[in-house]
Image (cartoon, grey):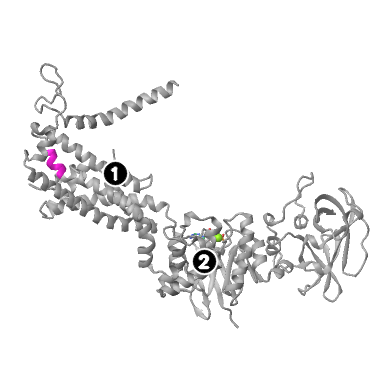
Amino acid sequence: MSGFLEFQGVTKRFGHVLAVNDVSFSVKKGEFFSLLGPSGCGKTTLLRLIAGFEQPDEGRILLDGQDITRLPANKRSVNTVFQNYALFPHLSVYDNIAFGLRVARRPKDEIEREVAAMLRLVQMEDKADRFPNQISGGQKQRVAIARALVNKPRVLLLDEPLAALDLKLRQRMLLELDLIHDEVGITFLYVTHDQGEAMSLSDRIAVMHSGVCEQIASPAEVYEAPKTSFVASFIGDTNFFDGVVTSFPENNYCKLDINGFAEVVCYNDKQKAIGDRVNLSLRPEKFRVSVDPPPRQNPHMNVLRARVEDIIYSGNHTNYWVSVGARRVAVYQQHLGYLLDEKPIRWGDDVWLYWDADTGYMLDDYAPIDESLLPPKAPGGAASANPFTSGREDGAAK
Amino acid sequence: MRRSFFSMTMLGLVMAFLYVPVILIFAYGFVPNGVSMSFFGHDGRFLGFSGKWFGLIFSGHYSVRPLLQSFWLSLRIAGLATLVSCVLGTTAALALHKWKSRLQSIHYGLVYTPLIMPDILIGISLLMLFVASGIECGFWTILIAHVTFCVSYVTMTLLARLQDFDDRIIEAAYDLGAGPWYTFFRIELPLLLPGIVAGGLLAFTLSIDDVVITSFVNGAGTNTFPTYVSSMTKHSRNLPAVFVLSTLMLLFTCALVGVSKFLTSNHEPRRKA
Ligand SMILES: Nc1ncnc2c1ncn2[C@@H]1O[C@H](COP(=O)(O)OP(=O)(O)O)[C@@H](O)[C@H]1O
Ligand SMILES: [Mg+2]
């Protein structure tokens, strides 16, 4: 079963730069699909390939079964919301929105009706006669969306539509985009470098990294089961543990030797064998720290001794950076009970660090981790080496 | 303090150097004695201002026919040269803006050259071209000559405007289904019109007061307004009338340049000083 919008092995080069490298994916009809990745990873290029402003060097693009790879931009039934809006400065809000319908020579009364409906959808009825330089950034954004949507495109392409707005407005537009998507039922292809936007809006996310699609999955899956170390570190914060498989205590579980300082149990869905090197991603919120030893509930509970190095308290939760041997681990602990009743954890305390083996996730790859994508270090702290050092450096030094 | 005094003095001197001749020309249009060219009698008495040169020009003392004929010719040439150079200049500017290749830098050089080339050189080379190809000098050769330098000014004015042009809106038009023609007439042309008009006005003023190039290619007996006026200066008794005409011409060009300044942004190419 093929998708509504389909990429088949698409490659695009600019001189020596491989902007899009053999990308294949398919978007379902009506889906809110996001392309997420750091700046320069090829998201805009991918969008421009769909819009028809660029031609791929290899591969095909299918829209509803039809090959649109070589179709000119003005013949494709997709519309774009440009990052800088690109409204026509000499046309009023009304005429901007009506532009596509006039090009298509639709009857006058129909144009009037459709534009009025769009103005209502984006709540700009009272600004129809204004010109682009007379409205705010958020309003321009709405006009850009209305101008594209009024043509009832099969796919609406949005290139970082909220990037130019301030935080408050961004959050509001986020909600509105979600509502608009629900209301019009058109397929949205949304480009962003902001994981928050992608996570909160999308049905599925394609995480991109230097022209390659690293993972395509639902937001929860991308977060909980990242395929690669890039995905794990780009989306949310994480700790990397790498080690060697030493034994299989149970079906589906394996024991890892983490560079000789600890043995941890982890869930093994990757059919690893003894002696394999594996990379484990452990989200900071999956850990617990406590002064008292934890209750041993199940055999998959990993329990280690650790020393507290940094504490940042922020009301509903506290971030701890603890050291386990030579390694620093980030722990984001939610305060489920009444904090003042618990035994306080202070700097330099020896604590218990524990987590369920099921909460970690084994990565597919074993690539070095891009340091720049790791979560922020704890502020201050004399020993403020990267708290998330995965120990790979130690391994390499051996 | 000293420094500001010095720079103010220099500024004053420069302004005087530039504008005193203009003021004198304006003033001598009202001179009472056309032979002595003086406002004072032999006894040193101030004779006052005289409007007779204005009167003479408009009353038919001079044969007004050739004057009017030359003016009409100038208008036609300037109008046509403006029209042609606007069309050519717009297409040239768009081409230079859209495609950036080695060939385009040569194109740019070709368009830019007339701005820095001395008028005499342009005039002589055009004359040689016309003579060599056996074209009789007259209306058409003047027109061609004017178009050659006007195109450069229109192109440069428009290129400066295109710098601030957001190319994304062209893509937006295509994205919304418009073809190249629709996009040109509904988006590009309306947005570039102020620039085209500004370039056109510049072309018009340059064409209507060109003497040097025109005097090479006008052929015998064909005179534009400026070449006619310049030939009048050879008879010194007409001098005050020439001053009056110059003043009128100055006011006319000032008005045009004013409109052009109003329409164009602050960075348009200047004619060489
Ligand atoms: N027109 C172009 N010419 C040359 N290189 C380009 C062009 N467009 C994009 N690139 C390059 O392709 C890569 C991907 O760019 P882009 O798709 O804009 O990334 P993103 O939108 O994810 O930030 C970048 O390295 C960029 O420099
Ligand atoms: Mg981009």
- Specify the label residue A126 is tagged with: none
Residue B229 in magenta? yes
Q: Nearer the viewer, mark 1 or mark 2?
A: 2
Disc 2 residue lies near ligand 2 with CB under 8 A: no
Front-lying residue, A353 or A396: A353
**Label 2: few (<14), some (14–19) or many (≥20) C-alpha neighbours in 10 Å:** many
Answer with the quarter of the image where residue A194 lies: bottom right
Residue B218 left/right relative to A194: left
Answer with the quarter of the image where residue B183 lies. bottom left
Res. B36 in view: yes
Question: Against B209, is A88 above or below?
Answer: below
Residue A172, magenta (yes or no): no
Question: Looking at the rendering, in which quadrant would you find the N terminus of chain B?
Answer: top left
- Which amino acid type corresponds to the residue marked 1 in the rendered image? Val
Pointer 2 residue: A119
Residue flagged by tag 2: what amino acid is it? Leu
Instruction: Give the magenta part as a residue range.
Output: B225-230
Q: Main secondary structure of the magenta part?
A: helix
In whole angstroms, how far apart are the C-alphas of marks 1 and 2? Answer: 43 Å
Q: Which residue is mark 1?
A: B257
Where residue A225 appears, as percent x and y from the top left, is 73, 69
